[in-house]
Amino acid sequence: AWYGRDFRRWWLLSEGEHTSGESLEASTELLASRAVSNYWDAVGGVQLDTGDSTRSWLSVGVRGLAPYWFEVDARLLLGESGQSALTLESEYDLRLTQKLILQPMAELTFNGRSMAQHGEGRGLADVHMGLRLRHEFTPQFAPYVGVEHSRQFGDTARFHRQQGEPTRDTRLVLGLRLWF
């Protein structure tokens, strides 16, 4: 959700994930943005991650539309005890018809230091890639189906293996994209 005009906005972003047998993992962000060019906004605010452990972050970065219509979101997260992370996300809408859209996406996470208690290693920690097919009945209402694959790397993968958790996961996703 957002409030404001084209040049200055407040964003409330939230996403969550629940797998049977595990607790709900969620991330909620409150960001302020300011346009810095025709297609790019500088953003800053706070992020709260909940689930097995709760953490809060200071978030700064950029969001925008790269050449060839790639949506990009790059953020630096600064947390307690010197924690830091860099997240890079990109997605692209490939219109198959006027109402049927195929959307590839990728998200990379890099950590500034190892945090064994959170199961996170330094460097490239994980990669999420996906492909969603959505049908826009209207731009405001679009159900989708897709597949996502995630994989951990380096010390992050080692921490997950030590806990008996897989380092790769592929899943089917179903959802509804709402815009109001």
Image (spheres, rainbow, N blue to C red):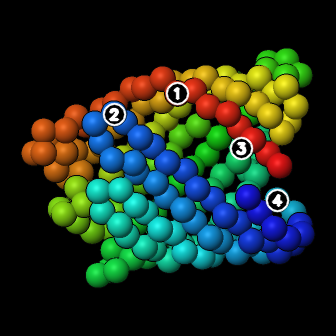
Residue farthest along the bottom direction in this orientation = 81
Whole-percent x and y of residue 69? 78, 42
Q: Earlier in the sequence, mark 2 or mark 1?
A: 2
Q: Please tell me which residue is depicted at 43% across the width and 63% down the height of the picture.
A: 49
Q: Is any atom of residue 158 visible in this view? A: no
Residue matched to label 4: 39
Q: Is residue 80 above or below residue 101?
A: below
Helix, strand or loop status at disc 3: strand
Q: Amino acid at mark 4?
A: Tyr
Q: Earlier in the sequence, mark 4 or mark 1?
A: 4
Foreground tag (2 vs 1): 2
Q: Amino acid at mark 2?
A: Ser
Residue matched to label 1: 173
Q: Nearer the viewer, residue 120 or 145?
A: 145
Mark 4 and mark 2 residues within 8 Å of each other at the beta carbon? no
Helix, strand or loop status at disc 1: strand
Q: Please tell me which residue is depicted at 48% across the width and 29% down the height of the picture.
A: 148
Residue matched to label 2: 20
Q: Is residue 38 above or below residue 170?
A: below
Taking the image as shown, residue 142 lies to the left or right of residue 7, namely left
Q: Amino acid at mark 1?
A: Val
Whole-percent x and y of residue 107? 50, 46
Q: Is residue 14 above or below residue 157?
A: below
